[in-house]
Amino acid sequence: MQDPGQRRLQIAEGDRTATLNVVPFNDDMSQLMIAGHAGPGEGLTSSLVVQAVLRICKEMSKHCEVGG
């Protein structure tokens, strides 16, 4: 599911889902909020979704960090 107007994307794989919301602060900074469940044996910061987002950030030469 994607909703460009609300800057929201929802993805699913099997019985796992994740929702990503983009919250823009200004032209140079946005916050990406990810809500979902980590899979079996995955910690919150090692989930497949978080790792995919960090990989995309790196490929785009953007600074991204995982918050608490």
Image (tube, grey):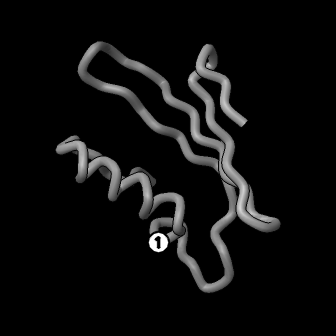
Image height check: is 55 above or below 32? below
Q: Which residue is found at the position 24% from the left and 21% from the top?
A: 28
Q: Pointer 1: what residue?
A: 46
Image-quadrant location for residue 41: bottom right
Q: Position of residue 13 (x, y in %)?
A: 71, 63
Q: Position of residue 52 (x, y in %)?
A: 44, 59
Q: How many marks?
A: 1
Viewer-proximal residue among 45 and 6: 6
Image height check: is 64 above or below 47? above
Image-quadrant location for residue 8: top right
Q: Which residue is found at the position 66% from the left and 24% from the top?
A: 3
Image height check: is 36 above or below 44? above
Image height check: is 41 above or below 3? below
Q: Amino acid at mark 1?
A: Ser
Image-quadrant location for residue 24: top left
The quarter in which the C terminus is drawn is bottom left
Q: Position of 25 compared to 46: left or right?
A: left
Q: Position of residue 20 (x, y in %)?
A: 58, 40
10 Å crowding of disc 1: few (<14), some (14-19), many (20+): few
Q: Which residue is found at the position 59% from the left and 20% from the top?
A: 4
Q: Position of 13 compared to 56: left or right?
A: right
Residue farthest right in this picture: 15
Residue farthest left in this picture: 61
Q: Which residue is found at the position 66% from the left and 74% from the top?
A: 39
Viewer-proximal residue among 45 and 18: 18
The quarter in which the N terminus is drawn is top right
Q: Secondary structure at mark 1?
A: helix
Q: Position of 36 compared to 26: left or right?
A: right
